Image (cartoon, grey):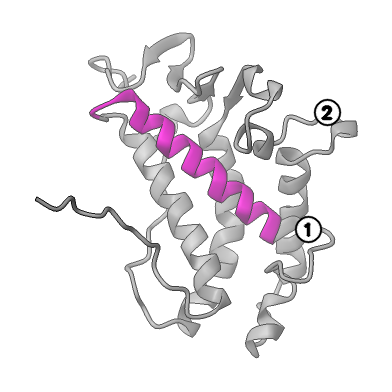
Amino acid sequence: MKRKRLTYSRPDKLNDFYTVAYEIDMLRFAAGRLLESDWKNERDAWVYLEAFLLHYRNLIEFLGKDVPSKTDLHVMTIWEKAGVAAPDGIEETHKHGKRLWARYEPKDADGGCRISQYLHHCTTKRTDSKEWQINEMNEQIEPLLKAIDRHLRPEMKPLLKPVFPAEFPRNFAASTTVATHTAVLPVLIDGVDYLPVGKPKKGFDEK
């Protein structure tokens, strides 16, 4: 009996707009999954956390990097390459994007602790404890994504349905944390109440 080959591929990107829209959709999808917290295995949470961080990092580079390389897509240049007018207020979007880039991808001289340091190859940095304020990160980037997303989609033929932004409950907004330790173990934190991911406590989301 022949063994089946397991082969997957991501959706084709017909142009650069599709690439950015894919990043936006996958970030929102991962955020939505982190909100659910009813995974069959706690390692599911690790997958969604790492996916969220990966796409977040890609998007803040697109939005906020000062000097992109020749092949990088960038919020200030993608429109001209596509032959369409840049959205109004794109400079303001880039300005706020630079703040996120500086905050989450700081140089070593500015403290380090970059997202990329927790996602790339195995290094001693991976043993440093790090808490990711997912709700705060989401709230910071969503206004920038909305500012460009509505200008990307009209130029695209729909291949997949767009993913709507994740909506974090208000009582989670100030304190919900997905923490990553050596093994990237996530826990949800509400105030001082620590709860293992995947085993929601009755009434956890109620005040």
Report the magenta residues as a range.
40-62
The image position of residue 130, as x and y in percent, is 62, 22
Query: Label 2's element?
Result: loop
The relative height of residue 80 versus residue 4 in the rendered view (above or below) is: below
Residue on which the image places disc 2: 111
Dot 2 alpha-carbon crowd within 10 angstroms: few under 14, some 14 to 19, many 20 or more = few
Residue at 53% across / 68% down in the picture?
Answer: 19
Residue at 63% across / 35% down in the picture?
Answer: 121
Residue on which the image places disc 1: 95
Query: Label 1's element?
Result: helix
Residue 81 relative to residue 111: left or right: left
> What separation in Å lies between label 1 and label 2 (alpha carbons)?
21 Å
Does 60 appear in magenta?
yes
The image position of residue 202, as x and y in percent, is 23, 15
Residue 204 relative to residue 63: left or right: left
Rendering quarter of residue 190: top left
Nearer the observer, 16 or 142: 16
Residue 99 relative to residue 127: left or right: right
Nearer the observer, 172 or 19: 19
Amino acid type at mark 1: Lys
Residue at 66% across / 39% down in the picture?
Answer: 116
Residue 188 relative to residue 60: left or right: left
The image position of residue 66, as x and y in percent, is 83, 59
Q: How many marks?
A: 2
The relative height of residue 88 versus residue 196 in the rendered view (above or below) is: below
Furthest residue to the right? 109
